[in-house]
Amino acid sequence: MTSQSTTSKDSIDATRDDGKWLSAFYDPVASLYTFSQCITLSDINADGDNKLIIADLGTGSYQMKLKVYKGTNLVSENTLIDLPTGVATFYMDQNEPRTPAVAVASGPYMYVYKNLRPYFKFTLPSLEINPLEQDVWNQVRDERIDVGVLREMLEGMRAEGTSLTVRSLRFIQLQAEDLEAFANQYKHTPLKKQTVITSLGTMKKSLAEEDAISCLVLGTESKQVYILDPEAFTVLSTMNLPSVPVFLNVSGLYDVEFRIIVACRNGNIYMLKRGTKNARSCIELNSQPVGLERMGKNIVVGCMDETLQCYTTKGKKLWTIKLPASITSMENVDHKSKGFKAVMVALSNCEVHIYKDKYLVNIIKTEDIVTGMKFGRFGREDASLIMTTKGGGLIVKILKRTAVFEEKDATAGPPVSQNIKLNVPKKTKLFVDQTMREREHCVSMHRMFQHDLYRLRLDAARSYVKALETSMNPVSTNTTEPLKLSAQVQGIGPTFKLTVNLQNTSISTASFNLLITFQFDDRLYNIHKTYIPVPMLVPGLSYAFETFVDCLSDKGISDTIKVFVLRQGRSVPIITAMISMPVSETMVVV
């Protein structure tokens, strides 16, 4: 047990940051408080130098800013009115130079920046207001009811599960002395019900090129997913979900075919396709999702129960990994020049684990808990890893060009080859015909099989009884004479050496008055000792008895010799062995 744990520990140490990453930059007081959804890398100036774009959450109430870094220098800042929930870059036109726009999701708005300047603000469509809520506010405006009645009616609606507007929810939370002033301030303002953006993604519109025009994909608190036109910023498609989306993963082209994998707040993962308005339930998780990445045709999900799980797009679970700590962030690694694809998982124990399929291939130790990660081209380096920490720090690491990730797990387990799928051949016409025949004649085939099986068991039982009756087995079944017999032949002929080994398998009882004799064809063989007396057999010891056998025929034929162990005065042998004699070599006279 100790040896196994030591080996496992050594193998894990071998996967740690052992020179695969260059520590390019670390600023523990960068004052960046953000998550992976609010970090992106893009060549926003079309100069071949990718910039780092971060939507900073600030203190959570103020100082929310959109920051742009060139290298490690802050080159631009734009103030945000509300907390950002996502950042993405996309191409919205075919103009030269090809500079992407920056989209920032914040509250109910989508802010679009072009050349780092405000360009457009998209507002989510207003939701339908409950008629009863609208009516009670109209009565307050017409002074038909007072604020006390208004509060009672709104609280009753909320208790019944009615979705209220922000104004009504704020009104219910006020103290009694503040209700009148609040109602007088807002009762003449039209009532609006606005939702907020919870997740953000991009989707290529008609071409798959890297600089092709892309649509924006928005997940909202109203359990809907919107796809926006990148030029007119109108809603191209609206899809409904059973719960609030928290993570989006988009693939495909809007004009051709696309898939949107959505992790929702109810702990389920849903699939959206082109041409469908409602989501298809795909995966039901055991715990809340904290990260979602797509690896080829598989979905990798990080959960709150400290597990990393992999599913197919049809919902079949492939594997589950128990992690040493809770997950704080996840990021997809796609190093195209090396063909390396993996998933990065940041943990609360100040480690970042890199998994290739289900195998742990690398561990990066960090100075603080990582809350946001982004892997991609930064500056002119293709394989850069940007990390933000819980304390507001900024870490930049670069993957060495000589780094090689071994295709094996850091912990003990089955070999990689065990997970390689077998190349199962396609069904042939003969196979299909045989299958149809078995379906049509299943009853008769089963009866025939049972009949043959009973015949086989009967023949085996008869042979066994015959062997017991004639003592034709090398191990004695008699409890009073527990003996074991074996024999071997040495030589190439015409004279052979025959060695008989006899053992008393009893625990404490010795065997007496035994003898060894042989049965053979005297026209073929001549045995020097046809009768061998056996001394007392001590339990547990093996005794060897030797004799010589002469082959009398020169025609190249052979036969069997039977060896009997008998007790003096009895004609039935205790045990028997049959020796198949080899073909004798012809005697050469010189």
Image (cartoon, grey):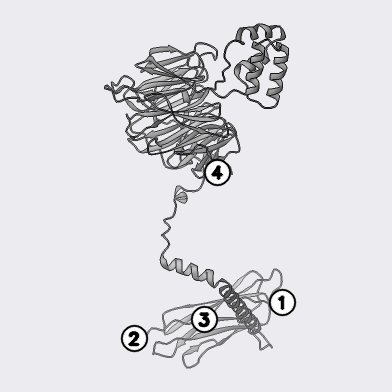
The circle on residue 588 is 2
Tell me where residue 498 appears, x and y as whole percent: 50, 80
Badge 2 element:
loop
- Mark nearest the camera among 3 and 2 is 3
Residue behind mark 3: 579
Tell me where residue 320 appears, x and y as whole percent: 54, 41
Residue behind mark 1: 480
Residue behind mark 4: 4
First of labels 3, 2 by sequence position: 3
User: How crowded is the residue under tag 4: few (<14 C-alpha within 10 Å), some, or many (20+)?
Assistant: few
Tell me where residue 125 appears, x and y as whole percent: 50, 23
- Distance, label 3 to label 4, CA atoms, is 48 Å
Query: Mark 2 near mark 4, Cβ–Cβ under 8 Å?
Result: no
Q: In the depicted view, which residue is nearer to us: 572 or 108?
A: 108
Identify which residue is drawn at 34% across, 37% down. 338
- Distance, label 3 to label 2, CA atoms, is 26 Å
Query: Vertically, is 223 above or below 498?
Result: above
Identify which residue is drawn at 44% across, 34% down. 250
First of labels 1, 3 by sequence position: 1
Badge 1 element:
loop
- Distance, label 2 to label 1, CA atoms, is 50 Å
**Quadrant of the image for the C terminus?**
bottom left
Q: Dividing the picture into quarters, in which one does residue 193 lie?
A: top right
Q: Amino acid at mark 2?
A: Val
